[in-house]
Image (cartoon, grey):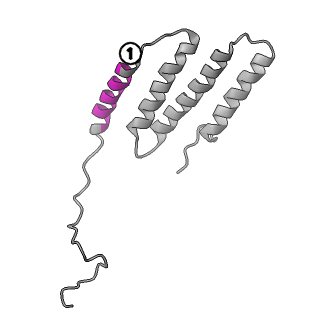
Amino acid sequence: MQVRIFGREPAVWVYTINTLVALLVAYGLPLTQLQVATISTMSTAVLAAIVAILTRPFVVSALTGAVGTTLTAVAGFGLELSEAQIGATVTALNVVLALVLRMNVSPAASAPPYHPGNHTGRDLTGL
């Protein structure tokens, strides 16, 4: 199953946001180069988070990576977070997700025993 947001792939939305920002800057929106790069990074990170949330099976590292990227990118608008603050936030998110997801995850049944040397699936005891 392919993840779509309002009927479009996430990459289309990232391109659309970047194009709109470039258009607005061309018509006089006073954004610095750092702020434009920050908007691009944040839009990519937010859409990556949405895709991570919608994807099954859920991949915790995809969501926490997107959140970490977003927290780093907001520095372009003046919110300075230290590496320790970003790390603590991502760690807290991991703990919350582990608590929430653990209720919905159960261990898989154990695999059948593996017998070295018999890779054909046939009974070779009579040979």
| Front-lying residue, 5 or 107 | 107
Q: Is residue 36 left or right of residue 66?
A: right
Badge 1 element: helix
Tag 1: residue type? Gln
Instruction: Give the crowd class for mark 1: few <14, some 14-19, many >=20 residues within 10 Å.
Output: few
Q: Kindly report the secondary structure that dominates the magenta region of the rendered protein.
A: helix
Q: What residue occupies the far left of the structure in this picture?
A: 125
Quadrant in the picture for residue 23: top right
Magenta stretch: residue 91 in it? yes
Quadrant in the picture for residue 117: bottom left
Q: How many marks?
A: 1
At 34% across and 20% down in the image, what residue appears? 88
Quadrant in the picture for residue 124: bottom left
Q: What residue occupies the far bottom of the structure in this picture?
A: 127
Name the spot of residue 69 as percent of width and height, x first. 49, 26
Vertical placement of residue 43 versus 31, above or below: below
Magenta stretch: residue 71 in it? no
Vertical placement of residue 112 versus 98, above or below: below
| Front-lying residue, 119 or 104 | 119
At 75% across and 17% down in the image, what residue appears? 25
Name the spot of residue 9 as percent of width and height, x first. 62, 41
Name the spot of residue 17 as percent of width and height, x first. 67, 27
Q: Quadrant of the C terminus?
A: bottom left
Magenta range: 88-101
Vertical placement of residue 72 versus 120, above or below: above
Q: Determine which residue is flagged by label 1.
A: 85
